[in-house]
Amino acid sequence: MWRDMKCCATKKFPTLLIQLKYSEDREPVIRGLERVSKPGCRDLYPARQHSVGQGWHGHRHPVLLREACSAGRRGARALVARSSARFGKRSPCEREVMTVSRIGRMPIPVTDAVKVSIDGNRVKVVGPKGELEREFHPTMRIKQADGELVVERPDDSRQSRALHGLTRALLANMVTGVTEGFQKQLQINGVGFRAEEKGQGVVLQIGYSHPVEVNPPEGIRVRPEAGGRIVVEGIDKELVGEVAAKIRAVRKPEPYQGKGIAYVGEVIRRKAGKAGRAGGA
């Protein structure tokens, strides 16, 4: 469906400003244009008025959109989309269209098992797994209605646009944390390397002359599993990632034999070493 479409005549030649919105079934929503680039807000100009070889704001190859010709026309007319990767270089009329953040405008669903209390810019979320409380930027407005949390920003400045998406992401992580929780998995690689559970933390035998004890902060649990795997669990996504990073930093995976502690699924760049180079020569 169209979200917004208008014509702006403030430039040298007329400009058609279109803001696109995907349908729920991910079907094409525009029948008259063939999209070549990623969706977004573009300035469209006739190709005969703008050289294809000339870029916009340093881009050597501008984006092309082809308009499907109807019966009676002599052929499809190419349109050149001039855009910028920097928000600050957008035209004034394009800033009027770009009034929302793709992440920030999305509402956060709140189930009946979650209780949210808003006191100014401080939000407290209570759920089955625990409770989280956080203070957000004072310019962001957080509202709760119809079982959803919505974040609003005061203006379209660069800082407000950045804080809009950040605030919404942090709120969504709080709701997900108290309902489902977060976890990060690590893998120990090396002969004789192992981890033993001790309270809420672990003791690592990782090739040093002494064992390394890891004591996580309150609300975080670290437990070893079979096969040299370590699982970090908690309701705070930031703390889970921080504790997992500290465990990995005890002995980072080295590139020759891959020994050390790595994230599950992490790709380690391997090196051949002196023996491998000598054999290849």
Image (cartoon, rainbow, N blue to C red):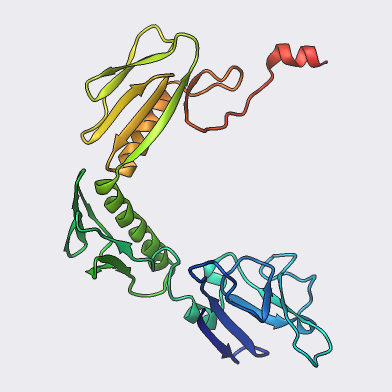
- Residue in the picture at 65% in, 90% down: 14
Q: Position of residue 114 (x, y in %)?
A: 20, 55
Q: Give the residue displayed 74% in from the left and 66% down from the top.
A: 61
Image side of residue 81 versus residue 47, left or right: left
The quadrant holding residue 12 is bottom right
* Quarter that holds the C terminus: top right
Up the image or down, 14 lies above or below 23; here it is below
- Residue 180 appears in the figure: yes
Q: Residue at x 51, y 33 (%)?
A: 265
- Decide: is 277 above or below 223: above
Instruction: Residue 56: name its quadrant.
Output: bottom right
Relative height, residue 105 to residue 196 (above, below): below
Q: How many marks?
A: 0
Task: Find residue 65 and report its horizontal and vertical position in percent.
Answer: 70, 74
Left/right of residue 278 with respect to residue 34 in the rendered view = right
Percent across and percent down for residue 218 are: 21, 34
- Residue closest to the far front: 25
Whether residue 140 appears in this view of the structure is no
Residue 51: image location, x then y, percent: 79, 76
Q: Choose top left, top right, bottom left or bottom right for residue 99.
A: bottom left
Horizontal placement of 275 versus 21: left or right? Answer: right
**Residue at the (30%, 56%) spot, across then down:** 171
